[in-house]
Amino acid sequence: MTSYSLPEGFNEFDIFAFGSVLLVCGLLGFCLNFISLMAFMRVKELRTPSNVFIFNLALADLSFSSNALVSAYASYLRYWPFGSQGCQIHAYQGMISVLAVISFLCAVGWDRYHMYCAKQKTLWSTSLTLSIIMWSMAVFWAALPLPFIGWGVFDYEPMKVGCTLDYTRGDRGSVIYMVSVVVLYLAFPLLIMHLSYSSIYVYFKKTHSFKFNTGLPVKVLLIFWGPYMLICIYSCFENTKLLSPKLRIVFPVLAKMAPVFNALLYAYSNESYRGGIWKFLTGQERSYKKK
C-alpha cells in the first residue's frame, strides 16, 4: 500500500475527525437540499416566483455539499487524488456555490420584505431575471482567481484534501480580490438582509403576528461565513501563515456546515414550503400557505 505523508500540523486523528465532519455535513446538506429541489419540481403548488429563490438557494447549497463530499473522500484517502487541475475545478465549483448561496440568501430576505412590508408579490419575470443575474455574477467572480486570469489564487486547504481561495498569498491582486468579494458578497448582502428583516420584525410586532424568527437569517450567515470572511480581511494586513493550520482549516469546515442549516431554516421551517415537501415525500396533502 502506498503511504502518504500527513500535512504539516495534522495527525491521523485530525484528518479523520475533520474528514468525518465534512462527510456528515456533506451528506446531510446534500440529502436535505435534494429533497427540497425535488419537492419544488414535483409539487405544482410550490412553483411560485418567491419559491424560485428558495429553489436556487437549495441548488447552490447542494452544489456546495457535493464540494464537501469530495473533500471528505480525499481526507479518507489522506491525499488529494485529482491533481492540480482537479484542484482548480474543485475550488472554482466551490466558489460559485458560495457566492450563489449568499446571493440567494439576500434575495430571499429582499423578497420577504416586499411580501410582508411592501405588500408586493414577486413576478415570475423578476425572480427568473434576478436568478440568472446572480448565477452569472457568481460564475464571473469565481472565475477571476483561475490561472488564466490570476486575480486571486485557488490552492489547497491546509489539510491538502480540498481546494479553495488562498488567502495566505498577500499579493496585490489577491488582496484586491478578497476585499472586493468581502464587500460585494458579505457587507452588501448583510446590509440588505439586516434592513429587510428589521423592517419585517417591525411589521410583525405591529401586527402581533410573528411568522418566523426574523433574527435567525442574519445570525446564521454571520456564524458560518463571518469567521471565513474575517480571516480573509485579516490576511490583507497580516501573514496568516503564522496561524496554526488547524485553526485555518476550521473556517472552511465551519462554512461547509451552512447548507444543512440553510435547508432547515429556509425550506423545512418555511410554512409555505414545508407542506410541499411533506406532499412530495408522502403523497399526502397538508395545509400550507402559498407565497
Image (spheres, rainbow, N blue to C red):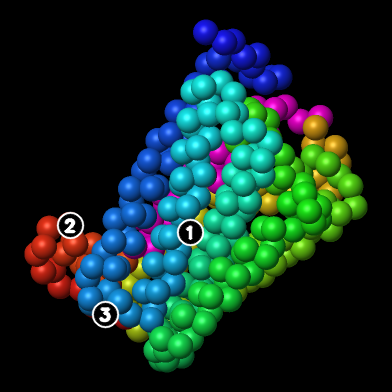
User: Which mark is drawn over residue 281?
Assistant: 2
- For the residues labelled 1 and 2, say whether their Cβ atoms are less than 8 Å apart: no
| Residue 21 appears anywhere in the view | no
Query: The C terminus appears in which quarter of the rendering?
Result: bottom left
Q: Quadrant of residue 84?
A: top right
- The residue drawn where x is 23% and y is 67% is 42
Q: Residues within 10 Å of mark 1 (few under 14, many from 20)?
A: many
Which is nearer the eye, 104 or 228?
A: 104
How far is disc 2 from disc 3 in space, using C-alphas?
18 Å
Residue 269 rendering spot, x and y as whole percentages: 31, 61
Residue 60 disc label: 1
The circle on residue 290 is 3
> Mark 2: which amino acid?
Leu
* Circle 2: element type: helix
The stretch of residues the image draws in magenta is 242-267
The kind of residue tagged 1 is Ala
The answer to which of 82 and 99 lies nearer the viewer is 82
